[in-house]
Amino acid sequence: MSEHISSQFENDILQINVNLTKMGGICEDNLKKAIKAITKNDSELAEYIIKKDEELNALESEIDDLVIKTIALRQPVADDLRLLFAAIKISSAFERIGDLIKNIGKRTLLISEEQPIKLRQPIAELGKRVHSQLTKAVNSYTDQDKKLAKQVWSEDVHIDKMYAEITKDLVVSLRKKKHIEVGSHLLFVAKNLERAGDYTADISEMIYYVITGDHIIKERPKGDS
């Protein structure tokens, strides 16, 4: 590979990494805002989250196009090829997390202000746990930290357990007629958060693969969800 082509290739890889990091950062910020929106019933913040999702979609498309172009023109091998294929999967997972967060924003707009805030507190705790895992996953990518990536992957079980407990409690609250509306919406929000946790674990698994060249062989621990 000539020096000119090598430089172009390095620029392409750098841009892919920059875009992936941007996607992770947007997901982190949007999730934090979504937790606040659902707990405070902040419709303005919910609208912001919904609109911001468009940026994630654009970044995913840009990464896909750049990966295809890089493979076609640069003919990468070994480690670089592994990174490129993983980038498509990671960006897709970030985009899906963005969709789940957007759904939380939409649910926030449907919940009446008169509904009790206390029912939303367990959702906030689940959201904070998912946000913590997402932050660690993004950090494991930027720092190329295989140990942290594997830790995020294995700790998804705690999110599953929290989700199972919250679901049980919300089902009980649905027996009270006045809580049917908010309880139903919060069940969907809880599921969105649990799925965001799953995608975060998938991302960390791909990051581990990028760093080491090996797949995590064990089956991921699961809670009783």
Image: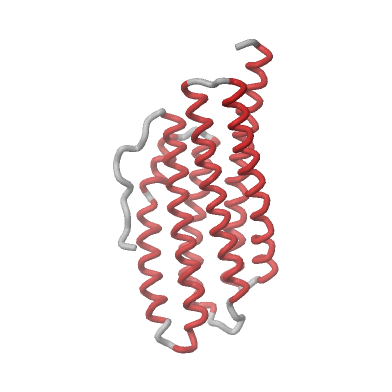
Please state the horizontal and vertical placement of residue 71, each as a whole percent of the image: 57, 26
Quadrant assignment for the N terminus: top right
Quadrant assignment for the C terminus: bottom left
Residue shown at 63%/49% (left/top)? 56
Above or below for 194 versus 209: below
Residue shown at 70%/68% (left/top)? 44
Above or below for 121 versus 97: below
Front residue of 6/136: it is 6
Front residue of 35/67: it is 67
Please state the horizontal and vertical placement of residue 194, each as a whole percent of the image: 44, 59
Tell me: 188 left or right of 56: left
Q: How many marks?
A: 0
Please state the horizontal and vertical placement of residue 173, each as a whole percent of the image: 42, 81
Please state the horizontal and vertical placement of residue 96, each as a whole percent of the image: 53, 52
Determine the image quadrant of residue 18. top right
Residue farthest toward the bottom in the current orientation of the protein: 177
